[in-house]
Amino acid sequence: MLARPKSQRATGRITLSDVAQAAGVSPSTVSRALRGERAVDPLLIERVVSVSEKLGYVPDPAARALASQRSDHVTILIPLLSNTLFVDLLEAAQRTLRAEGYQTLMGVTHYDAGEEELLLREQLHHRPAGLLITGLNHSSGSQRLMARNKVPCVHLMDLPDEESRPVAESVNEAELGPYCVGFSQTDAGEAMTRYLLGQNKKRIVFAAAQLDPRVMRRLKGWRRALKSVDLHDPHLEWLNPAPSSLALGGLMFEQIMKQCPDVDAIFFCNDDLAQGALLAAMRLNVAVPQKVAIAGFNDLMGSDQMWPPLTTVRTPRAQVGEAAAKMLLQLIRGEVPEQAQLNLGFQIIARQSA
Protein backbone atom coordinates (compact mmCIF):
# COMPACT_ATOMS: atom_id res chain seq x y z
CA MET A 1 0.00 0.00 0.00
CA LEU A 2 1.34 3.44 -0.93
CA ALA A 3 2.20 5.84 1.89
CA ARG A 4 0.58 9.25 2.06
CA PRO A 5 2.90 11.63 0.10
CA LYS A 6 4.60 14.19 2.33
CA SER A 7 4.04 16.94 -0.23
CA GLN A 8 0.28 16.48 -0.37
CA ARG A 9 -1.50 19.81 -0.09
CA ALA A 10 -3.47 20.79 3.00
CA THR A 11 -6.59 20.65 0.83
CA GLY A 12 -6.09 16.91 0.47
CA ARG A 13 -5.68 17.15 -3.29
CA ILE A 14 -3.09 14.78 -4.76
CA THR A 15 -0.67 16.65 -7.03
CA LEU A 16 1.47 15.67 -10.00
CA SER A 17 4.53 15.94 -7.74
CA ASP A 18 2.97 13.46 -5.32
CA VAL A 19 2.60 10.91 -8.12
CA ALA A 20 6.16 11.56 -9.29
CA GLN A 21 7.52 11.08 -5.74
CA ALA A 22 5.62 7.81 -5.27
CA ALA A 23 6.61 6.49 -8.70
CA GLY A 24 10.25 7.54 -8.36
CA VAL A 25 10.29 9.66 -11.51
CA SER A 26 10.22 13.35 -12.40
CA PRO A 27 6.93 15.32 -12.65
CA SER A 28 7.56 15.90 -16.37
CA THR A 29 7.84 12.14 -16.90
CA VAL A 30 4.55 11.62 -15.07
CA SER A 31 2.91 14.24 -17.26
CA ARG A 32 4.19 12.62 -20.45
CA ALA A 33 3.28 9.13 -19.25
CA LEU A 34 -0.28 10.09 -18.37
CA ARG A 35 -0.69 11.65 -21.82
CA GLY A 36 0.37 8.33 -23.30
CA GLU A 37 3.18 9.81 -25.36
CA ARG A 38 4.73 7.20 -27.62
CA ALA A 39 8.31 8.10 -26.61
CA VAL A 40 7.65 6.93 -23.04
CA ASP A 41 8.41 3.29 -22.19
CA PRO A 42 5.09 1.36 -22.00
CA LEU A 43 6.19 -0.30 -18.74
CA LEU A 44 6.88 3.12 -17.23
CA ILE A 45 3.45 4.34 -18.39
CA GLU A 46 1.87 1.32 -16.73
CA ARG A 47 3.69 2.04 -13.45
CA VAL A 48 2.79 5.72 -13.42
CA VAL A 49 -0.85 5.02 -14.25
CA SER A 50 -1.02 2.40 -11.50
CA VAL A 51 0.46 4.79 -8.93
CA SER A 52 -1.81 7.67 -9.97
CA GLU A 53 -4.89 5.44 -9.69
CA LYS A 54 -3.92 4.18 -6.24
CA LEU A 55 -3.34 7.72 -5.02
CA GLY A 56 -6.54 8.97 -6.64
CA TYR A 57 -4.76 11.59 -8.72
CA VAL A 58 -7.02 13.67 -11.00
CA PRO A 59 -5.19 15.97 -13.49
CA ASP A 60 -6.07 19.66 -13.41
CA PRO A 61 -6.38 20.66 -17.08
CA ALA A 62 -6.65 24.37 -16.31
CA ALA A 63 -3.44 24.34 -14.25
CA ARG A 64 -1.66 22.33 -16.92
CA ALA A 65 -2.71 24.82 -19.60
CA LEU A 66 -1.51 27.78 -17.53
CA ALA A 67 1.81 26.13 -16.76
CA SER A 68 2.62 25.05 -20.29
CA GLN A 69 0.78 27.74 -22.27
CA ARG A 70 -0.97 24.91 -24.09
CA SER A 71 -3.57 22.31 -23.21
CA ASP A 72 -4.07 18.73 -24.26
CA HIS A 73 -7.74 19.06 -25.11
CA VAL A 74 -9.66 20.13 -28.19
CA THR A 75 -13.15 21.63 -28.17
CA ILE A 76 -15.72 20.27 -30.63
CA LEU A 77 -19.01 22.12 -31.13
CA ILE A 78 -21.81 20.27 -32.95
CA PRO A 79 -25.52 21.08 -33.37
CA LEU A 80 -27.07 17.80 -32.12
CA LEU A 81 -26.22 14.42 -30.67
CA SER A 82 -29.56 12.87 -31.66
CA ASN A 83 -28.57 12.98 -35.36
CA THR A 84 -26.23 10.15 -36.43
CA LEU A 85 -24.77 12.61 -38.93
CA PHE A 86 -22.91 14.36 -36.11
CA VAL A 87 -22.25 11.19 -34.10
CA ASP A 88 -20.32 9.72 -37.05
CA LEU A 89 -18.32 12.94 -37.39
CA LEU A 90 -17.62 13.22 -33.66
CA GLU A 91 -16.43 9.62 -33.28
CA ALA A 92 -13.99 9.91 -36.18
CA ALA A 93 -12.58 13.23 -34.94
CA GLN A 94 -12.22 11.99 -31.38
CA ARG A 95 -10.49 8.78 -32.47
CA THR A 96 -7.97 10.76 -34.56
CA LEU A 97 -7.23 13.30 -31.83
CA ARG A 98 -6.92 10.74 -29.07
CA ALA A 99 -4.30 8.82 -31.05
CA GLU A 100 -2.14 11.97 -30.79
CA GLY A 101 -2.69 12.44 -27.05
CA TYR A 102 -5.54 14.98 -27.16
CA GLN A 103 -8.76 14.78 -25.19
CA THR A 104 -12.00 16.24 -26.54
CA LEU A 105 -14.51 18.50 -24.83
CA MET A 106 -17.83 18.57 -26.66
CA GLY A 107 -20.54 21.21 -26.74
CA VAL A 108 -24.00 20.91 -28.30
CA THR A 109 -25.37 24.14 -29.77
CA HIS A 110 -28.89 22.99 -30.72
CA TYR A 111 -28.63 25.11 -33.88
CA ASP A 112 -28.78 28.22 -31.68
CA ALA A 113 -26.23 30.95 -32.49
CA GLY A 114 -26.55 32.43 -29.01
CA GLU A 115 -25.99 29.07 -27.34
CA GLU A 116 -23.00 28.45 -29.61
CA GLU A 117 -21.50 31.79 -28.57
CA LEU A 118 -22.01 31.01 -24.88
CA LEU A 119 -20.42 27.56 -25.24
CA LEU A 120 -17.53 29.02 -27.18
CA ARG A 121 -16.91 31.66 -24.51
CA GLU A 122 -16.97 29.00 -21.77
CA GLN A 123 -14.68 26.63 -23.65
CA LEU A 124 -12.10 29.30 -24.49
CA HIS A 125 -11.67 29.94 -20.76
CA HIS A 126 -10.17 26.44 -20.60
CA ARG A 127 -7.52 27.42 -23.18
CA PRO A 128 -8.12 24.56 -25.65
CA ALA A 129 -5.31 23.55 -27.98
CA GLY A 130 -7.72 23.81 -30.89
CA LEU A 131 -11.33 24.11 -31.98
CA LEU A 132 -13.53 22.13 -34.34
CA ILE A 133 -16.81 23.92 -35.02
CA THR A 134 -19.70 22.98 -37.29
CA GLY A 135 -20.51 25.21 -40.22
CA LEU A 136 -19.34 28.64 -41.27
CA ASN A 137 -22.22 30.86 -40.18
CA HIS A 138 -21.64 32.14 -36.65
CA SER A 139 -22.78 35.17 -34.66
CA SER A 140 -20.59 38.26 -34.81
CA GLY A 141 -19.75 37.63 -31.15
CA SER A 142 -18.56 34.09 -31.89
CA GLN A 143 -16.47 35.31 -34.80
CA ARG A 144 -14.83 37.96 -32.61
CA LEU A 145 -14.09 35.38 -29.91
CA MET A 146 -12.39 33.05 -32.39
CA ALA A 147 -10.43 35.89 -33.98
CA ARG A 148 -9.22 37.43 -30.71
CA ASN A 149 -8.26 34.19 -28.97
CA LYS A 150 -6.28 32.96 -31.99
CA VAL A 151 -7.03 29.33 -31.20
CA PRO A 152 -6.36 27.04 -34.19
CA CYS A 153 -9.77 26.38 -35.70
CA VAL A 154 -11.22 24.14 -38.42
CA HIS A 155 -14.82 24.44 -39.60
CA LEU A 156 -16.81 21.29 -40.37
CA MET A 157 -19.26 20.09 -43.04
CA ASP A 158 -19.24 23.16 -45.28
CA LEU A 159 -17.12 25.16 -47.69
CA PRO A 160 -17.05 28.97 -47.86
CA ASP A 161 -18.73 31.31 -50.27
CA GLU A 162 -19.06 35.07 -50.06
CA GLU A 163 -22.14 34.79 -47.82
CA SER A 164 -20.60 32.39 -45.29
CA ARG A 165 -17.00 33.57 -44.94
CA PRO A 166 -16.26 34.16 -41.23
CA VAL A 167 -13.86 36.72 -39.81
CA ALA A 168 -10.28 35.65 -40.54
CA GLU A 169 -8.45 34.37 -37.46
CA SER A 170 -4.99 35.41 -38.68
CA VAL A 171 -3.24 37.30 -41.46
CA ASN A 172 -2.40 33.97 -43.06
CA GLU A 173 -6.02 32.86 -42.88
CA ALA A 174 -7.16 36.16 -44.35
CA GLU A 175 -5.19 35.18 -47.44
CA LEU A 176 -6.18 31.50 -47.50
CA GLY A 177 -9.74 31.79 -46.26
CA PRO A 178 -11.09 29.84 -43.26
CA TYR A 179 -9.73 26.37 -42.62
CA CYS A 180 -12.56 23.96 -43.27
CA VAL A 181 -13.32 20.39 -44.31
CA GLY A 182 -16.59 19.44 -45.96
CA PHE A 183 -18.39 19.71 -49.26
CA SER A 184 -20.53 22.21 -51.13
CA GLN A 185 -24.05 22.03 -49.72
CA THR A 186 -25.26 24.12 -52.66
CA ASP A 187 -23.70 21.81 -55.25
CA ALA A 188 -25.16 18.78 -53.48
CA GLY A 189 -28.66 20.29 -53.51
CA GLU A 190 -28.29 21.13 -57.18
CA ALA A 191 -26.96 17.67 -58.05
CA MET A 192 -29.92 15.86 -56.47
CA THR A 193 -32.37 18.19 -58.20
CA ARG A 194 -30.69 17.59 -61.55
CA TYR A 195 -30.87 13.85 -60.90
CA LEU A 196 -34.64 14.15 -60.40
CA LEU A 197 -34.93 16.25 -63.55
CA GLY A 198 -33.08 13.47 -65.35
CA GLN A 199 -35.81 11.08 -64.17
CA ASN A 200 -38.25 13.28 -66.11
CA LYS A 201 -39.61 14.98 -62.96
CA LYS A 202 -40.78 18.54 -63.49
CA ARG A 203 -42.82 19.50 -60.40
CA ILE A 204 -40.17 19.02 -57.71
CA VAL A 205 -40.86 20.14 -54.14
CA PHE A 206 -38.02 21.07 -51.79
CA ALA A 207 -39.23 20.10 -48.30
CA ALA A 208 -37.06 21.23 -45.39
CA ALA A 209 -37.04 21.44 -41.59
CA GLN A 210 -34.65 23.01 -39.06
CA LEU A 211 -33.66 25.61 -41.72
CA ASP A 212 -30.08 25.95 -40.55
CA PRO A 213 -27.59 27.58 -42.97
CA ARG A 214 -26.55 24.27 -44.55
CA VAL A 215 -30.18 23.39 -45.32
CA MET A 216 -30.70 26.82 -46.87
CA ARG A 217 -27.72 26.28 -49.15
CA ARG A 218 -29.27 23.00 -50.34
CA LEU A 219 -32.38 25.04 -51.11
CA LYS A 220 -30.18 27.43 -53.07
CA GLY A 221 -28.90 24.51 -55.15
CA TRP A 222 -32.47 23.27 -55.77
CA ARG A 223 -33.45 26.73 -56.96
CA ARG A 224 -30.42 27.02 -59.21
CA ALA A 225 -31.11 23.69 -60.94
CA LEU A 226 -34.79 24.45 -61.55
CA LYS A 227 -34.20 28.02 -62.69
CA SER A 228 -31.70 26.78 -65.25
CA VAL A 229 -34.52 24.85 -66.99
CA ASP A 230 -37.24 27.44 -66.27
CA LEU A 231 -39.11 25.14 -63.85
CA HIS A 232 -38.67 27.00 -60.58
CA ASP A 233 -41.92 27.58 -58.67
CA PRO A 234 -41.56 29.30 -55.27
CA HIS A 235 -44.84 27.69 -54.19
CA LEU A 236 -43.00 24.36 -54.14
CA GLU A 237 -40.65 25.51 -51.37
CA TRP A 238 -42.01 23.70 -48.32
CA LEU A 239 -40.12 25.13 -45.33
CA ASN A 240 -40.75 24.38 -41.66
CA PRO A 241 -38.40 25.65 -38.89
CA ALA A 242 -39.34 22.77 -36.55
CA PRO A 243 -36.70 20.11 -35.73
CA SER A 244 -36.28 17.43 -38.38
CA SER A 245 -37.93 14.06 -37.57
CA LEU A 246 -39.72 11.06 -39.08
CA ALA A 247 -43.03 12.32 -37.70
CA LEU A 248 -42.61 15.74 -39.30
CA GLY A 249 -41.66 14.12 -42.60
CA GLY A 250 -44.87 12.12 -42.60
CA LEU A 251 -46.92 15.21 -41.79
CA MET A 252 -45.20 17.25 -44.50
CA PHE A 253 -45.85 14.49 -47.06
CA GLU A 254 -49.57 14.47 -46.24
CA GLN A 255 -49.76 18.26 -46.48
CA ILE A 256 -47.88 18.38 -49.78
CA MET A 257 -49.99 15.68 -51.42
CA LYS A 258 -53.17 17.40 -50.27
CA GLN A 259 -52.23 20.93 -51.32
CA CYS A 260 -50.06 20.16 -54.38
CA PRO A 261 -51.49 16.94 -55.85
CA ASP A 262 -49.73 17.50 -59.19
CA VAL A 263 -46.17 17.26 -57.77
CA ASP A 264 -44.14 14.37 -59.15
CA ALA A 265 -41.12 14.49 -56.81
CA ILE A 266 -40.23 15.64 -53.29
CA PHE A 267 -36.63 16.36 -52.32
CA PHE A 268 -36.38 16.33 -48.52
CA CYS A 269 -33.47 18.17 -46.89
CA ASN A 270 -32.71 15.25 -44.58
CA ASP A 271 -33.22 11.49 -44.63
CA ASP A 272 -35.33 11.30 -41.47
CA LEU A 273 -37.95 13.51 -43.15
CA ALA A 274 -37.82 11.37 -46.29
CA GLN A 275 -38.09 8.16 -44.25
CA GLY A 276 -41.19 9.55 -42.54
CA ALA A 277 -42.62 10.45 -45.95
CA LEU A 278 -42.11 6.90 -47.25
CA LEU A 279 -43.96 5.51 -44.24
CA ALA A 280 -46.79 7.99 -44.80
CA ALA A 281 -46.96 7.05 -48.49
CA MET A 282 -47.45 3.39 -47.55
CA ARG A 283 -50.17 4.35 -45.07
CA LEU A 284 -51.96 6.51 -47.66
CA ASN A 285 -51.49 4.03 -50.54
CA VAL A 286 -49.51 6.59 -52.58
CA ALA A 287 -47.28 4.76 -55.07
CA VAL A 288 -43.59 5.66 -54.83
CA PRO A 289 -42.01 6.51 -57.25
CA GLN A 290 -44.86 6.02 -59.76
CA LYS A 291 -47.10 8.76 -58.33
CA VAL A 292 -44.39 10.77 -56.61
CA ALA A 293 -40.65 10.23 -56.27
CA ILE A 294 -39.02 10.79 -52.87
CA ALA A 295 -35.38 11.71 -52.25
CA GLY A 296 -33.43 12.57 -49.11
CA PHE A 297 -30.07 13.87 -47.95
CA ASN A 298 -27.18 12.38 -45.90
CA ASP A 299 -27.83 8.63 -46.42
CA LEU A 300 -28.55 8.03 -42.75
CA MET A 301 -28.85 4.62 -41.15
CA GLY A 302 -31.93 2.74 -42.33
CA SER A 303 -32.43 4.62 -45.59
CA ASP A 304 -31.40 1.57 -47.63
CA GLN A 305 -33.85 -0.56 -45.62
CA MET A 306 -36.94 1.56 -46.30
CA TRP A 307 -39.55 0.48 -48.81
CA PRO A 308 -38.85 1.43 -51.44
CA PRO A 309 -35.18 2.04 -50.54
CA LEU A 310 -34.46 5.74 -50.37
CA THR A 311 -32.61 7.68 -53.05
CA THR A 312 -30.37 10.18 -51.26
CA VAL A 313 -27.17 12.22 -51.15
CA ARG A 314 -24.39 10.37 -49.33
CA THR A 315 -22.24 12.75 -47.29
CA PRO A 316 -18.76 11.87 -45.93
CA ARG A 317 -19.36 12.50 -42.23
CA ALA A 318 -16.69 10.20 -40.78
CA GLN A 319 -14.16 11.31 -43.39
CA VAL A 320 -14.88 14.95 -42.54
CA GLY A 321 -14.29 14.28 -38.84
CA GLU A 322 -11.00 12.48 -39.45
CA ALA A 323 -9.65 14.94 -42.03
CA ALA A 324 -10.65 17.98 -39.95
CA ALA A 325 -8.93 16.56 -36.88
CA LYS A 326 -5.76 15.93 -38.91
CA MET A 327 -5.87 19.47 -40.28
CA LEU A 328 -6.32 20.87 -36.78
CA LEU A 329 -3.33 18.86 -35.52
CA GLN A 330 -1.24 20.46 -38.26
CA LEU A 331 -2.35 23.92 -37.17
CA ILE A 332 -1.63 23.13 -33.51
CA ARG A 333 1.92 22.13 -34.50
CA GLY A 334 2.31 25.42 -36.35
CA GLU A 335 2.22 23.82 -39.78
CA VAL A 336 0.33 25.22 -42.77
CA PRO A 337 -2.09 22.67 -44.30
CA GLU A 338 -1.63 22.01 -47.99
CA GLN A 339 -5.27 23.02 -48.57
CA ALA A 340 -7.16 25.53 -46.44
CA GLN A 341 -10.51 24.30 -47.78
CA LEU A 342 -10.68 20.53 -48.24
CA ASN A 343 -13.60 19.40 -50.41
CA LEU A 344 -14.45 15.74 -49.77
CA GLY A 345 -17.40 15.75 -52.15
CA PHE A 346 -20.67 13.78 -52.02
CA GLN A 347 -22.45 10.99 -53.90
CA ILE A 348 -25.92 10.64 -55.37
CA ILE A 349 -27.15 7.23 -54.22
CA ALA A 350 -29.86 6.15 -56.63
CA ARG A 351 -32.33 3.66 -55.16
CA GLN A 352 -35.92 2.72 -55.99
CA SER A 353 -37.70 5.68 -54.35
CA ALA A 354 -36.71 8.08 -57.16
Image: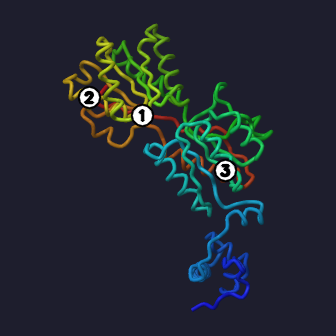
**Residue pictured at 49% horizontal, 11% vertical:** 227
Q: Please state, as top left, top right, bottom left or bottom right, where the N terminus lies in the image.
A: bottom right
Image position, residue 127 (x, y; %): 71, 55
Pointer 1 residue: 244
Q: Between residue 231 and residue 195, name the one nearer to us.
A: 231
Furthest-top residue in this view: 230
Which residue is label 2 attached to? 280
Q: Earlier in the sequence, mark 1 or mark 3?
A: 3
Q: Secondary structure at mark 1?
A: loop
Residue 25 in the image: above or below residue 184: below
Position of 266 with respect to 51 (left or right) is left
Q: Tell me the mark number nearer the camera, choosing from 2 and 3.
A: 3
At a point 59% along the width and 47% down the height, the residue shown is 324
Q: CA distance from mark 1 to mark 3?
A: 28 Å
Q: How is the image coloured?
A: rainbow
- Residue placed at 66% from the left, 51% from the top? 123
Which numbered disc flags the more N-terminal residue, 2 or 3?
A: 3
Residue type at numbered disc 3: Glu
Amino acid type for the residue under numbered disc 2: Ala
Quadrant housing residue 251? top left
Position of 103 relative to 342 (above/below): below
Q: Residue at x 67, y 25 (%)?
A: 162
Tag 2 and tag 3, C-beta contact below 8 Å: no
Within 10 angstroms of label 2, few (less than 14), some, or many (20 or more) residues? many
- Residue 116: x percent and y percent? 61, 41
Reading the image, the residue beneath label 3 is 122
Measured as percent of width and height from the top left, residue 76 is found at 59, 49
Which one is nearer the viewer's eye here, 37 or 13? 13
Distance between mark 2 and mark 1 Cα atoms: 16 Å
Amino acid at dot 1 = Ser
Quadrant location of residue 98?
Answer: bottom right
